[in-house]
Image (tube, rainbow, N blue to C red):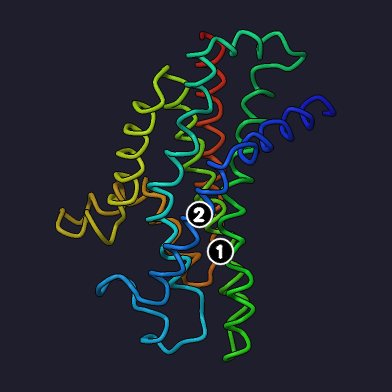
Amino acid sequence: MEQLKFFYKKELSSYFNTPTGYVFIVVTIFFNFLFFFLGIFDLIPGFWNAKVASVESYMNLLPFTFIFLVPAVTMRIWAEEKKTGTIEILKTLPLTEFQLVLGKFFACWTFVSIVIVSAIPLTLTISLMGNIDWGRTITLYIGSILMAGAYISTGMVISALTREQIVAFVITFFISLFMFLSNYYLLVQHLPAEFNFLIGFFSHSFHFSSFSRGMIFSGDLLYFVSFIAFMLYLNVEIIKKS
């Protein structure tokens, strides 16, 4: 466990050893705050127009954010190691492939979670303006972090399949976009009813919708945990064969 903890800290620090990590955080927070207050057409109302003491609009922006942010932060996780040959050095460490995958996953998940929890000061400020629904707000944070983990685990699998970061970014971007657009409410509403649930079930944003309503269903929790576990399993198998 000590070796895994050290590897996790090393991977997490790599996001902050260069200006890139800070740029990701600042740019993401800036645009999230901008669209939170201004809104996005009729999809997400601006905070001042909604006239509701809630960060729901901010959290509903996160699926859009993950489509761009997650591919950018996961594309290098394995692709860079394979291209530079350092993956062979990693395999000489007293860590199993499963521990290597876990260390990288939790480091990246922590980094993206920092972007999510950066909205806490905004939440506290809004709470001073009105009676904020803390139960719903907390579930929004929980759902957002779980959804981030699902996107990250997918990005890691794609990164492990290629040596080129740009290729990993493009593929992860389109997969993330599909996972968002396959939401029951966006893509499948014009399909026959019998296909609605089946297609919508495999959309991250579909399962996030219950969290955005302030409810935590065991089925949605199981979906995210199972999806992440399956992607990490695939990641381990790919690394073993690399």
In the displayed structure image, the side of residue 209 where residue 218 appears, left or right: right
Instruction: Give the label on residue 58, or none.
Output: none
Question: Helix, strand or loop at disc 2?
Answer: helix
Neighbours of disc 2 within 10 Å: few (<14), some (14-19), many (20+): many
Please provide percent x and percent y for residue 76: 49, 28
Question: Helix, strand or loop at disc 1?
Answer: loop
Q: Quadrant of residue 118?
A: bottom right
Q: CA distance from mark 1 to mark 2?
A: 7 Å
Q: Quadrant of residue 65?
A: bottom left
Instruction: Give the label on residue 220, or none.
Output: 2
Please provide percent x and percent y for residue 47: 42, 81
Neighbours of disc 1 within 10 Å: few (<14), some (14-19), many (20+): some
Residue at 56 percent across and 34 percent down: it is 229
The one of 237 and 166 positioned closer to us in this rendering = 166
In the picture of the structure, the residue carrying the numbered disc 1 is: 216
In the displayed structure image, the side of residue 156 where residue 38 appears, left or right: left
Residue at 22 percent across and 54 percent down: it is 187
Residue at 50 percent across and 65 percent down: it is 211
The residue sitting at the right extreme is: 2
Give the position of the N terminus as an image quadrant. top right
Q: Is residue 65 above or below residue 127?
A: above
**Amino acid tagged 1:** Ile
Are circles 1 and 2 on residues that touch, CB within 8 Å?
yes
Please provide percent x and percent y for residue 219: 51, 53
Q: Is residue 113 above or below residue 95?
A: below
Residue at 37 percent across and 35 percent down: it is 172
Q: How many marks?
A: 2
Q: Quadrant of residue 119?
A: bottom right
Q: Is residue 215 above or below residue 231?
A: below
Please provide percent x and percent y for residue 142: 59, 59
**Amino acid tagged 2:** Asp
